[in-house]
Image (cartoon, grey):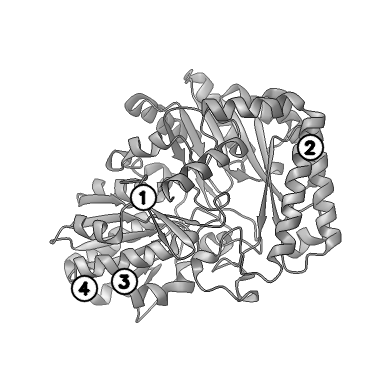
Amino acid sequence: MSIVLINPNLVAQRNDPFTTGIVYMPISLAYLAGALRAAGHALQVIDAYAAAPRQARREGNFNFYGLTAAQVAERIPADAQVVFLYAINLTNHLSSLALVRAARAAAPAAKLVVMENTQAVTAYALSEVAAEFYAAGADFVLTGEAERRALRLLDALQAGAPAALRTIDGLGSPDFYNLPAGFMDESQLDALPLPAWDLFPLENYWSLRFAHGPLSAERYLPLLTSRGCPYPCGFCVVPATNRQKWRPRSAANVVDEIEHFQKTLGVSEFHVEDLDPTISDERIRAICAEILRRDLQVTWKIAAGTKVETMRDEETIDQMAAAGCRYISISPETGSPRLLKLMRKPFNLQYAVRLVKRMNQVGIRSQACFVLGYPGETPEDRRMTWDLVHDLTQVGVDEVALFIVTPVPGSSIHKQFSGYASLSELNFSPTWREDYAELARFRLRLYAHFLWWKLRYHPLKLLRQPFNFLRRRFETKMEMVPYRALALRWLAR
């Protein structure tokens, strides 16, 4: 069939260029492209952001980067039979809706499918918001892992079998919705074709010199070495989209991908975008051993975070460093044991301090992420977060990220909030929250104290940051974010 895959625009909240406007390469869409191409379908990819990343426009409180909806519509072939729109991130929701409307007008006979992003905490459960997409002109939403479900959908459409559509798990329409029935296991993940990055404008991503993870090379690619997460955190969409199922790829399969793209695209830096790549300590050690066995000269960074306790001990950290790991993000979320229980987030605070200390000793840059404003949080809870940030800084954490809780559709706290006008306002600086000003002041004070503590305990690290910024060889996100914010603001001037 003639198929179009669309990645939406990058959308940034104008009053918050630091926690919005983060560039995520559409890895799940690239996986879908690889699977569809392997099945013999004719494909066209329209990356509405990366096709023109330096083109910007203002719409209300947001800046949109990339092609306009009209420009995307012009690129959709008249004979397109199926159009997939990738709902990559919640903040980009306004762009996704606009592109569905544009595709509907440009290809009235095509079937429009909105595809869920199941492998990101910044995404959202489409079953919760499907009505908005149907109202914009979508025919279907596709939830759960897309590769096999999309092929079943295309087979049913090609056969003209409407009854068969109702049997596809994970598929929804204005008339029905079927929950995803299962997930791919290790052998099925290993059997997937590699992401079809050759169909995407990679040079445009690389020319930006910023990414989600701290970018220190001229070329990089994201990696998904596993899928899912076994934890039930209340602020997160992932328990809804993955049902607490973690599924790994084999170590050999992961390193095959690294080696393939190093040889074919000259990529030497890889950003691991898994939800939890180190759940199996044995597997992460096997990945390290395989990289070393093949003598691959690569750098890799755990950009999206991992569960620190799943890295068994300092020996695992040592092996990761030897195999090229240069950055690990972890998520304590809070320093309060009471609040961790409310969040349903298991976390060993002292173990995190211990392993961050080891990362500092072996040259792995580290990030600790926290959330503020979780329902039930008290000033005492925030005081304990303050103290944990101090302790982590003392042992060598390189940066902290402080996010204000937002009600992601699909998370268990979603219905506890109101007051926002658009789903794109559900980001890490939710200015519509009544307590936003108080939380933002606390966040700013804690950031300032973190920098003071870092200067006190690790002055050379702090003094190194301006040089990394000027060279555009970023070791941490904190060095890269101001560069990205300045670039995006200049484009939208």
Q: Earlier in the sequence, mark 1 or mark 3?
A: 1
Q: How many marks?
A: 4
Mark 1–mark 3 CB contact (< 8 Å): no
Amino acid type at circle 4 is: Ala
**Of the pair 455 and 215, the residue shown nearer to us:** 455
Question: How far separated are the C-alphas under marks 1 and 2?
Answer: 37 Å
What residue did someone put label 2 on?
Answer: 452
* Res. 161 mark: 4
* Labels 1, 2: front one: 2
Q: Quadrant of residue 192?
A: top left
Q: Earlier in the sequence, mark 2 or mark 4?
A: 4
Mark 1–mark 2 CB contact (< 8 Å): no
Q: Earlier in the sequence, mark 4 or mark 1?
A: 1
Describe the element under mark 4 as helix, strand or loop: loop
Mark 3–mark 2 CB contact (< 8 Å): no
Q: Is residue 354 above or below residue 330?
A: above
Q: Residue furthest front?
A: 493
* Labels 4, 3: front one: 3
Question: How far separated are the C-alphas under marks 4 and 3?
Answer: 19 Å
Query: Residue 489, how many percent across, how many down?
Result: 48, 48
Question: How far separated are the C-alphas under marks 1 and 3?
Answer: 21 Å
Amino acid type at circle 1 is: Tyr
Which part of the image, by quadrant, shows the N terminus?
Answer: bottom left
Query: Residue 50, how many percent across, how many down?
Result: 35, 46
Give the residue drawn at x 19%, y 66%: 107
Question: How far separated are the C-alphas under marks 2 and 4?
Answer: 65 Å
* Labels 2, 4: front one: 2
Q: Residues within 10 Å of mark 4 (few under 14, many from 20)?
A: few
Amino acid type at circle 2 is: Trp
Q: Is residue 220 above or below residue 191?
A: above
Q: Quadrant of residue 258?
A: top left
Question: How far separated are the C-alphas under marks 3 and 2?
Answer: 51 Å
